[in-house]
């Protein structure tokens, strides 16, 4: 497969079942709190946030490029295990950065699990670096699973 065969496009409501199945197979360390309703809400709120990479019509990668009006956030970079190390992740990241540039964003941050060393290589190759001075603080909200 050459890199020119991979197409990156925005995902829509019709893509959600395939995306959810894809994340179960390709996403590392997912919290498994995914639901169609949550992805529908994402796409309805921001129709260009869900980026999909396809090779010959087959889903081979995803990235959520969230823009909250102030900051650019990257989540769910996932590439199919059989298609890794072919530039798909890089293509998704580039497309997200192009999207953020249209908003005037000056920086993007990526959520990456500490133990997902495979992802560390991809993000580092794209020019990202870990910020050791920052930590993520989380609190489960009432009603969450």
Image (tube, helix red, strand yellow):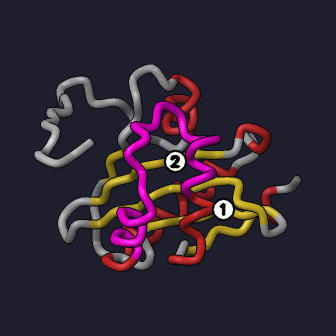
Read off the residue under disc 1: 53
Question: In what quadrant of the picture does the C terminus appear?
Answer: top left
For the point 32% across and 47% down, which residue is it? 109
Q: Earlier in the sequence, mark 1 or mark 2?
A: 1
Judged from the image, the secondary structure of the residue bearing numbered disc 2 is strand
Dot 1 alpha-carbon crowd within 10 angstroms: few under 14, some 14 to 19, many 20 or more: many
For the point 40% across and 35% down, which residue is it? 112
Say if mark 1 contacts mark 2, CB within 8 Å: no
Residue 37 pos. (x, y %) = 38, 66
Magenta stretch: dominant SS?
Answer: helix
69 or 41: nearer the eye? Answer: 41
Dot 2 alpha-carbon crowd within 10 angstroms: few under 14, some 14 to 19, many 20 or more: many
Q: Does the magenta stretch include residue 11?
A: no
Residue farthest right in this picture:
1
User: Does residue 144 appear to the left or right of 81 in the view shown?
Assistant: left
For the point 54% across and 59% down, which residue is it? 94
Read off the residue under disc 2: 77
Residue 63 pos. (x, y %) = 50, 56
Judged from the image, the secondary structure of the residue bearing numbered disc 1 is strand
48 in relation to 6, above or below: below
139 in relation to 94, above or below: above
Q: What stretch is highlighted in magenta?
A: 20-43
Q: Could you tell me how many numbered marks the image carries?
A: 2
Q: Which mark is residue 118?
A: none
Q: Is residue 32 magenta?
A: yes
86 or 61: nearer the eye? Answer: 61
């Amino acid at each position: 497969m050459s890199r020119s065969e991979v197409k990156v496009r925005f995902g829509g409501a019709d893509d959600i079942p395939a995306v959810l199945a894809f994340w179960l197979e390709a996403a590392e360390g997912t919290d498994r709190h995914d639901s169609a309703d949550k992805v529908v809400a994402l796409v309805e709120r921001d129709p260009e946030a869900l980026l999909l990479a396809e090779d010959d019509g087959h889903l081979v990668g995803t990235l959520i490029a969230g823009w909250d009006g102030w900051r650019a956030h990257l989540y769910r970079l996932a590439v199919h295990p059989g298609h890794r190390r072919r530039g798909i992740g890089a293509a998704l990241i580039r497309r997200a950065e192009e999207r953020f540039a249209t908003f005037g964003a000056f920086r993007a941050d990526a959520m990456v699990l500490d133990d997902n060393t495979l992802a560390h290589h991809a993000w580092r190759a794209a020019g990202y670096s870990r910020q050791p001075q920052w930590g993520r603080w989380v609190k489960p909200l009432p009603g969450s699973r």
